[in-house]
Image: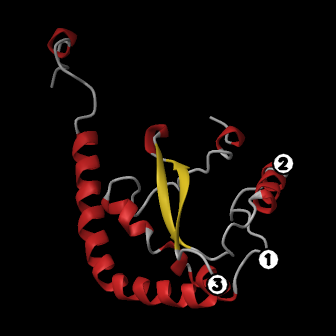
Amino acid sequence: MSALPESLLDDVDLRPVWLPRRARFKRVVDVVLGSIVLIFAAPVIACLVVIIRLDSRGPALYGQRRIGHLGRPFTLWKLRSMYHESSQTYHLQAAQDWFKEQRSGERYKTESDPRITRVGKYLRRSSLDELPQLFNVLRGEMSLVGPRPLMPYDRPSYKT
């Protein structure tokens, strides 16, 4: 069998054609699975909102600015696990220390953060505080599977 002459390949677009299809498929999976999970999670979220409001003052949901895919900023939604209007200084210092030590693996988490409410400890341990992110998935700002959206102040710490 003889090799094809290179001139036959001159007019062929060699860019991968599967990337747009793969992205669309991933989006369809995100919407379908996210919707199914949200149907079951909505009553849980509603109950947690009431419990959070009974535990401490302030809104039960809060939005946090994040950097998403292609550097697009968006508001990530979470159930509040800290006291309302807690300072970010404590977290910012923990994040800076984590990056200075050039750790990999599990992200920086403080064991005894005084800003966390009684209910918040349970929410964080069980990751239930992240259920509202299903709304971000349905809006296309996040994916069910993929890298975690960056905090704006974390961005300079990552190497390209």
Residue type marked 1: Glu
| Residue 44 location (% of width, % of height) | 41, 88
| Residue 22 location (% of width, % of height) | 26, 48
Q: Which mark is residue 100?
A: 2
Q: Secondary structure at mark 2?
A: helix
Relative to 1, say whether 27 is above or below: below
Q: Is residue 31 rendered to the left or right of residue 128?
A: left
Quadrant position of residue 35: bottom left
Determine contact: label 3, label 1, CB under 8 Å: no
Q: Earlier in the sequence, mark 3 or mark 1?
A: 3
Q: Name the residue tied to disc 1.
A: 111
Relative to 82, say whether 64 is above or below: above
Tag nearer the camera, 3 or 1: 3
Q: Is residue 11 rendered to the left or right of residue 52?
A: left
Q: Earlier in the sequence, mark 2 or mark 3?
A: 3
Q: Nearer the viewer, residue 92 or 23?
A: 92
Q: Is residue 130 rendered to the left or right of residue 89?
A: left
Q: Nearer the viewer, residue 60 or 16?
A: 60
Q: Name the residue tied to disc 3.
A: 56
